[in-house]
Image (tube, grey):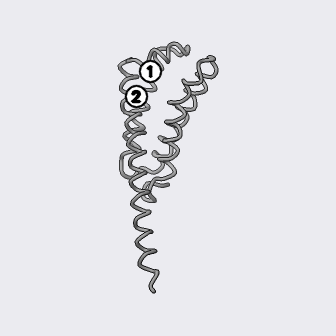
């Protein structure tokens, strides 16, 4: 009995699932960055009012919006492994900072769900990226 073929087939299948999972998670992260960044730039709800309620200055929306859009482009672009590291770090820091801001302002625990989820997805996307997208 030859066990090489099933092992090779299962390796290919595993690779396909991992690649699919990477792109699915990455699409969500990039979508959040692109849409959230645009909403920040245009000072749209829900992000802008929340940012102001947390005590941040209004100009931070322009800075964060620009950074999020740049991160979305860099994460999707082929190559640029060092910039990808910075983009992923920026997304994770942004989300952890958002969660910490809600905690610091004694807001409801439910306000931590979205930033914690997107931070986790950004970390998964970073961890699952293919070797060609690594530093």
Q: Secondary structure at mark 1?
A: helix
> 103 above or below 19?
above
Q: Which mark is residue 132?
A: none
Q: Secondary structure at mark 2?
A: helix
Name the residue nearer the viewer: 61 or 32: 32
User: Which residue: 36% across, 40% down?
Assistant: 73
Estimate how packed mark 1 is, as few (under 14), some (14 to 19) or many (20 or more) residues with alpha carbons within 10 Å: some
User: Which residue: 61% across, 26% down?
Assistant: 100
Mark 1 or mark 2: whose residue is earlier in sequence: 2
Estimate how packed mark 2 is, as few (under 14), some (14 to 19) or many (20 or more) residues with alpha carbons within 10 Å: many
Residue 130 left/right relative to 115: left
Name the residue nearer the viewer: 1 or 56: 1
The residue tagged 2 is: 36
Kindly check if marks 1 and 2 are in contact, taking CB atoms under 8 A apart as contact.
yes
> 23 above or below 60?
below
In x, y percent, where is residue 34? 37, 33
In x, y percent, where is residue 35? 36, 30
Q: Which mark is residue 47?
A: 1
User: Which residue: 46% across, 74% down?
Assistant: 7
In x, y percent, where is residue 1? 45, 86
How many angstroms separate mark 1 from mark 2 (CA)? 8 Å
Name the residue nearer the viewer: 3 or 68: 3
């Amino acid at each position: 009995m030859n066990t090489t073929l099933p092992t090779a087939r299962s390796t290919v299948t595993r690779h396909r699932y991992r690649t699919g999972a990477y792109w699915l998670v990455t699409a969500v992260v990039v979508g959040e960055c692109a849409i959230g960044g645009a909403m920040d730039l245009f000072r749209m709800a829900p992000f802008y009012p929340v940012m102001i309620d947390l005590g941040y200055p209004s100009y931070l929306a322009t800075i964060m919006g620009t950074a999020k859009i740049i991160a979305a482009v860099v994460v999707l672009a082929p190559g640029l492994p060092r910039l990808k590291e910075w983009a992923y770090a920026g997304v994770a820091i942004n989300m952890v900072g958002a969660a910490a801001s809600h905690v610091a302002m004694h807001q409801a625990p439910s306000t931590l769900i979205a930033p914690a989820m997107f931070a986790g997805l950004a970390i998964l996307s970073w961890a699952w990226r293919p070797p060609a997208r690594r530093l």
